Image (spheres, helix red, strand yellow):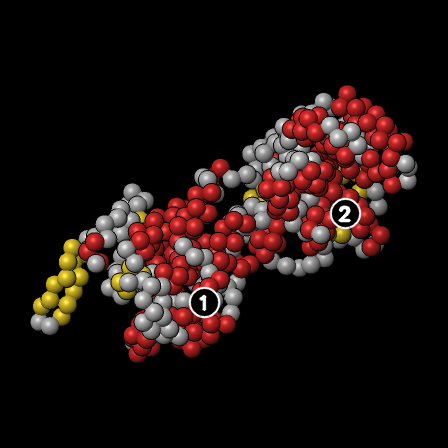
Amino acid sequence: MLASLNHPNIAAIYGLEEADGIRALVLELVEGETLAERLTRGPVPVTDALTIARQIADALGAAHEKRIVHRDLKPANVKIRPDGAVKVLDFGLAKAGGDDPTPDSQVSTMAGTRAGIILGTMAYMSPEQARGQSVDKRTDIWAFGSVLFEMLTGRTAFARDTASDTIAGILEREPDWTALPGSSSARIRDLLRRCLQKDPSQRLHDIADARIDIEGEGDPTDRQPSIAVLPFANMSADPDNEYFSDGLAEEVINLLAHIPGLKVIARTSAFAFKDKHEDIRRIAGVLDVTNILQGSVRKAGNRIRVTAQLIAAGDGSHLWSDRYDRELADVFAIQDEIAEAIAKALQVTLADKPAAPLSMMYVAGVQPAHEAVPLARVHAQKALELDPSLLEAHALLGLLAAMYDYDWTEADRRFRLAFARDPVPPLFVRIERANFFLAHVGRGREAVEEMERALAEDPLNVPETT
């Protein structure tokens, strides 16, 4: 059965030999280093980790199709060839007939009686395997999640100093999800959580689904750069200067939001971390961004000193920092300088022109609709005269066309214009299109996708999550 595994990502098994009463598998010689050796140098970059994980998933998928469960997947059993190809090794503990409910006590007993194997193998065992219960392909899916977690974080998900603590971690504790790099997407985070469900019935059902999720990421090197601007710390003695610090961070957010190709977390979510001394990597993980900007403001008389630093979410390293000493009257120049410096560090450029002012239709709250709607149209058209590409204005006109005129064709056209320029504001464009157009024309799936996208871009915005 094992010799029938013929797959590019599985080290070939040529046969079973016996000499002096000792049985041994004859395996393909694979050049390169093991994944365990690679991990001694630290976490694997997301791009490389997903490439390796996809090939591991392919190997497991081929084995599972033949009803073979590996049962011992771990970094030491994954070889990375010099050309980047991955080979899964050592099917010595593999179980043929993956749906057979026979208890797996042999594996747990072996691990429990050979101390040298406990942390090398048990750390990747599923809860049912650690208990000596029956196993199937979902045990390999657990191990796959453990290996992917370790590649991304550089640390094992459950291993502790002793075998008993390791078992307790596997059976009772969650991995440290905050250790995941900020550049790991929501899709990959969700994949890991599904792979590492302690109840097999709640776990990812098939390794092919993991491959689909990984392929859905596309080329990770093409991932959109993203940033969260945290509230600038007020280092002045006067607490009344807090408004200035907050206003500076807000203006930087507004300026960065006009950089094409840069995802900028909205103020609502970024300011949720105000006065909270948390690890930058955890904040980046919650907001799902690749970069964090933090800074401070000191004010003395009519002079201010602003410091700002751009931090890579993956490892907490500094990408850029600078200090600005200015007269208070020069505050707008400071804001522009900081935003442009950050843009240069991220290798993007500021948009040529700022957004034109736009009066939104919140006057509807104090005026009848027949009075408010014409006013909103006038303001939106005026805004488009100043900036024909202003997406909020197109979105407002699309909303009016849908909910006031019931002109779905015009609504569709306006929302398409609103989506023609990046970045698309999550609350004032994505949410409006989902709620007031897509949901009313029978395109519910697209509406849900837009809501999920808006939540990903502004995850802590209460109006979006309720």
Name the residue rendered at 31%, 66% in the picture.
100
Q: Earlier in the sequence, mark 1 or mark 2?
A: 1
Above or below, 188 relative to 74? above
Name the residue rendered at 48%, 43% in the picture.
217
Front residue (pair 404, 212):
404
Q: Quadrant of the N terminus?
A: bottom left
Would you call the spot at circle 2 few (<14 residues within 10 Å), some (14-19), or many (20 or more)? some
Callout 1, which amino acid?
A: Phe
Q: Is residue 434 visible?
A: no
Would you call the spot at circle 1 few (<14 residues within 10 Å), some (14-19), or many (20 or more)? many
Callout 2, which amino acid?
A: Asp
Rendering coords of residue 433 (x, y %): 68, 36
Frontmost of labels 1 and 2 is 1
Name the residue rendered at 52%, 49% in the picture.
187
In what element is the residue under mark 1?
loop
In the drawing, does residue 94 fall left or right of residue 446?
Answer: left
Front residue (pair 440, 276):
440
Q: Residue 158: which numbered mark, if any?
A: 1
Q: Which residue is mark 2?
A: 246
Q: Is residue 39 visible?
A: yes
Q: Quadrant of residue 417?
A: top right
Given contact means CB atoms under 8 Å apart, are the residues at marks 1 and 2 in contact?
no
Rendering coords of residue 447 (x, y %): 63, 41
In what element is the residue under mark 2?
helix
Q: Quadrant of residue 71?
A: bottom left
Rendering coords of residue 117 (x, y %): 31, 71
